[in-house]
Amino acid sequence: MKVFEKIKDLQHLLNESRSKNVAIGFVPTMGALHQGHISLIKAARQSCDLVVCSIFVNPTQFNDVGDLSKYPRTIEKDKRMLIEEETDILFLPSVEEIYPKDIDTTNPYDFGKMAEIMEGAHRPGHFDGMAQVVARLLRIVEPHKIFMGQKDFQQQAIVRKMMELMKIDTELIRCPIIREPDGLAMSSRNVHLSPENRKLATIISQTLFEAKENAKTMTLKKVKALALEKLNHPDCSVDYFEIVDAYTITPISDFEDTSSAVICTTVQIGGIRLLDNIILFE
Ligand code: AMP
């Protein structure tokens, strides 16, 4: 695996590959890799010739400085995991490399309502920061395909929208959520859970699985009410629990009104924000 810290070195190799018609697959991450990230690398490995992974803990998408400083960093382990999956390139830029003083890298796109609800409402500025870095990385790597997790459902929907606005023909591949054996969605933040909270955290996926079953026979209102009742636990704090259209990320009030529906939720357990979602139909 080749590791690049500088854009021009990375682009030199990518331009050479592109001129030989090599299909480039790109997996952007913030590191602290787990099997969820690795599933994206595997998907890229399967359908592309050259697999590029980036690790960059993007400061502009953290609205909380404490959250940024305690974000787990495990670079040596990450490198070993990437080598094991035969990743071709790791792009490991510094903050100055991504945000040089002399170019404007602010996000020029307005995503409207889809970025204002759920994560957008709870983390002001988060999606602007996320769009800023993903746009920058897309322009640097110019991949044929970008692989993103369903785990961050709203994020991948916004990136899809942004790529339309950017008029680039990179294909976005949404990869399924990888879960621990007990159902908890894998996340770099799970390491911060105490043993008791780790056990309790399964309540989130259990609620989503039950809601999907309930949605086969019940109204949306009833599905939501039962789920919120289950999540009403003294050690859980629900940031949001929304049933939205999978593409427009607009809340829906009746399953009959839409051709796609996904439940997105973020629940805080012991102060750790845990995101999860489940696609009901699309
Ligand atoms: P992050 O490092 O958290 O920014 O995540 C990088 C990419 O990995 C994003 O596209 C995430 O959606 C994806 N990802 C994170 N956790 C999982 C998971 N449990 N299953 C599948 N993809 C995931």
Image (cartoon, rainbow, N blue to C red):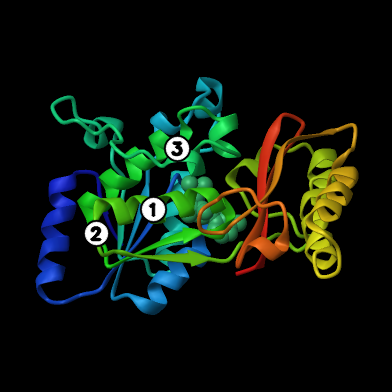
Which residue is disc 2 drawn over?
168
Residue 32 in view: no
Quick one: 224 or 177, which is closer to the camera? 224
Task: Of the two numbered discs 2 and 1 on the same chain, state the one appearing first in sequence.
Answer: 1
Which residue is disc 1 drawn over?
161
Q: Quadrant of residue 168?
A: bottom left
**Three-letter residue code for mark 3:** Phe
Task: Of the two numbered discs 2 and 3 on the same chain, state the one appearing first in sequence.
Answer: 3
Q: x and y percent of residue 70 in the render?
A: 55, 28
Task: Name the element at disc 1.
Answer: helix
Which residue extends farthest front?
A: 257
User: Alpha carbon of mark 2 to alpha carbon of mark 3: how far?
Assistant: 19 Å
Q: x and y percent of residue 7 in the render?
A: 18, 46
Residue depicted at 60% across the width and 69% down the height: 282
Is mark 1 in CB contact (under 8 Å) with mark 3? no
Quick one: 48 or 276, which is closer to the camera? 276
Q: Specify whether 89 is left or right of 33.
A: left
Q: Quadrant of residue 111?
A: top left
Tell whether circle 3 marks a residue whose Cβ is less than 8 angstroms from ligand 1: no
User: Alpha carbon of mark 2 to alpha carbon of mark 1: how far?
Assistant: 11 Å
Task: Name the element at disc 2.
Answer: loop
Residue depicted at 66% across the width and 61% down the height: 257
User: Alpha carbon of mark 1 to alpha carbon of mark 3: how far?
Assistant: 12 Å
Binning the other alpha carbons within 10 Å of mark 2 as few (below 14), some (14 to 19) or many (20 upward) gives: some
Quick one: 230 or 66, which is closer to the camera? 230
Q: How many marks?
A: 3
Which residue is disc 3 drawn over?
127
